[in-house]
Amino acid sequence: MTISDNIIQVRQQISLAAQRAGRDPAGITLLAASKMNDASRIREAFAAGITVFGENRVQEMLEKNALGAYDGAHLHFIGHLQKNKARQIVGIAELIHSVDSTALLALIAQLAQKKGIVQDVLLEVNIGGEASKSGFSPEEVPSALDFCEELSGVHVRGLMAIPPVCSDLQEIRPYFAQMQQLFVDIGGKKYDNSTMDFLSMGMSHDFSVAVEYGSNIIRIGSGIFGPRQYNLSADHTQQAQ
Ligand SMILES: *Cc1c(COP(=O)(O)O)cnc(C)c1O
C-alpha cells in the first residue's frame, strides 16, 4: 500500500463513518500526523491531497519546515509543548492543538503579542484523567476559558483529546461522548477570545468512532504513512506515542 492508497482508504472510511452519523464528510478535516516521516514522504502525502500536517516535536517540525516539507499546506502542532520551546512555534504552527496549562496559554499569548499576531490554539483535555497525560480536566476548561478572556494574543478555537488506550473500541465511546458534550456545552456560552470551532479527536485506530461524536479534525499517522520506524532514532522513540 502506498501513501496515496492509504489516504484514499482513510477518506473512504471517513465518508462511511460520516454517513452513518448523518454528517457531511466535507466538514471533517483529515490531518496527517507526520512525525518520524521525512520531507519526501510528507510531499508524497501532499501530492495525494493532504492539506494539513501535524507534528509533535518542535525540533523535528522546524527541520522539516526548513526543507519546505509543508509548503502549500497548513501546519499544526499536536504534541506536548514545553514552555522553553513555545517561542519557536508561535506564528509558525497555524494551530497548536495541545495547550495544557494556563501558564502555557499566558506564555503563548505574550509571544504572539510580541510578534503582532493572534495564535490559534486548542485546549487539550485529559478526558481519561490519566496521570501519564497532560491536559485540563473537563472541570477546569471553563476557568481556562475565563483566563483567556484577558489574553488577546490567543484565540481558543476548540478542544483536543487523546482518550485512554482501550482494548475494545466500545470502551472509548464514553470518552468521546464526554468530549462532545463539553464541546457543545461550552459552545453555548460566550467567552472573549474563544470560539468552539474544532473538536480534534480520533487517531488511526479509533477515528471512525470519533466521527460519530462530532470530531471535525481527525489526526492520522500510521493509517497514512504505515507503522512508524521506532529504530530510526532513540531520541524520537522516547517522545513518540
Ligand atoms: C502520532 C499522533 C497521532 C496519530 O497517531 P496514529 O495512531 O499513528 O494515527 C495523533 N495525535 C497525536 C497527538 C499524535 O502524536
Image (cartoon, helix red, strand yellow):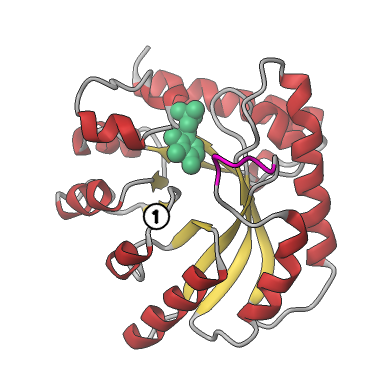
Dot 1 falls on a residue whose secondary structure is strand
**Does 104 appear above or below 215?**
below
Determine if residue 44 is in view. Answer: no
* Label 1, residues with CA under 10 Å away: few <14, some 14-19, many ≥20: some
The residue at 68%/83% (across/down) is 192
Q: Is residue 52 visible?
A: yes
Q: Is residue 218 above or below residue 138?
A: above
Q: Nearer the viewer, residue 161 or 91?
A: 161
The magenta segment is 129-133
**Left or right: where does residue 187 sit relative to residue 13?**
right
Three-letter code for the amino acid on which mark 1 is drawn:
His
Residue found at x 58% / y 22%: 205
Q: Nearer the viewer, residue 111 or 30?
A: 111
5 relative to 26, above or below? above
- What percent of the width, then of the height, locates residue 107? 43, 76
The answer to whether 151 appears left or right of 70 in the picture is right
Q: Which residue is mark 1?
A: 74
In this view, the residue in front, 223 or 126, is 126
Using residue 44 as the reference point, say whether residue 191 is left or right of it. Answer: right
The C terminus is located in which quarter? top left
Residue 83 sits above or below residue 17 on the image: below
x, y percentage for residue 6?
44, 20
Residue in the image at 48% along x and 82% along y? 153
